[in-house]
Image: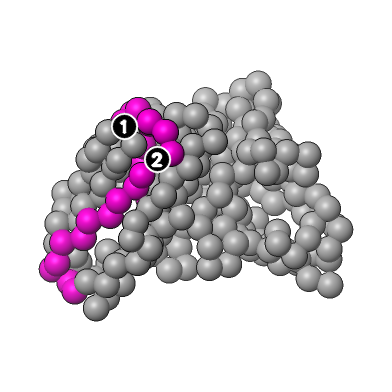
Amino acid sequence: EVQLIQSGAEVRKPGATVKISCKVSGYTFNDYNIHWVQQAPGKGLEWMGLLNPEDGKSTFAEKFQGRVTITADTSTDTAYLELGSLRSEDSAIYYCSVSGLVTGTDAFDIWGQGTLVTVSS
Amino acid sequence: EIVLTQSPGSLSLSPGERATLSCRASQSVSSTFLAWYQQRPGQAPRLLIYGASNRATGIPDRFSGSGSGTDFTLTISRLEPEDFAVYYCQQNGYSWTFGQGTKVEIK
């Protein structure tokens, strides 16, 4: 069974950095892109960026460039999202997802359960 | 950036009724790159439709997708209680963007 299991909720102060994880199982980690999606409270979905675990290269939405880092540890089949210079607007649920695994397209086949990040002084 | 506009913003219907959700793109999107997701309260989104009209694994046949170019539609033929949720369209042909969502509520 394919699973994406994310790390638990985090609370940070404004200006701090947060790093959340997404551990995958049930498929070959290197073979499919991992994406991160932000969902602010009561709002819609916003694509943040993706990582190609095979070559370690990442691509970001313009809004998040410069503040977001996406990395992977292929020894543990885990992807990471790091968001710096946190501000209150970054309070949101962050989802990881994998594309191409089931449908062979760039749609997001399987999703993690989400990680709540709260930014508060 | 391709902007997706979903309408209506919310839809109030009764179980057993038909729901028709629209997604309009700011520029033409190949059908191959249009997907629909369902998000129930407190849950992660899940893929319903990919390639504009292909149901994802395990999705009931009361869900169907259609459209081309800039206009796409998700239809739920007969609403079941578990279908009351928020639905998002997504284009994944030129980067990735989502529509703002349509909430299907119980009337």
Above or below, B77 against B47 in this view is: below
Left or right of A24 on screen, residue B31: left
Instruction: Point out residue A42 in the picture as x, y percentages from the top left corner.
Output: 53, 68
What residue type is disc 2 on?
Answer: Ala
Q: Dominant secondary structure of the magenta stretch? A: strand
Query: What residue is drawn where x is 83% and y is 66%?
Result: A13
Q: Are marks 2 and 1 on the same chain?
A: yes
Asked if B56 appears above or below A40 in the picture, the reply is above
Count the marks: how many? Answer: 2
- Horizontal placement of B5 versus A38: left or right? left
Give the residue number, with chain letter if any, for mark 2: B25
User: Where does label 1 land, which residue?
Assistant: B69
Amino acid identity at mark 1: Gly
Give the magenta range: B14-38
Instruction: Give percent across and percent down for residue A71.
Output: 71, 36
Residue A56 sits in quarter: top right
Q: Residue at 75% of width from left, 49% of height from top?
A: A83
Which of B16 and B69 lies nearest the eye of the viewer? B69
Residue B21 is covered by the magenta coloring: yes
Tell which subunit mark 1 falls on: B
Task: Residue B74 in the image: state x and y as whole percent.
Answer: 26, 49
| On screen, residue A105 above or below A117 | above
SS at circle 2: strand
Q: Quadrant of residue B104?
A: bottom left
Decide if residue B107 is on the left or right side of residue B24: left
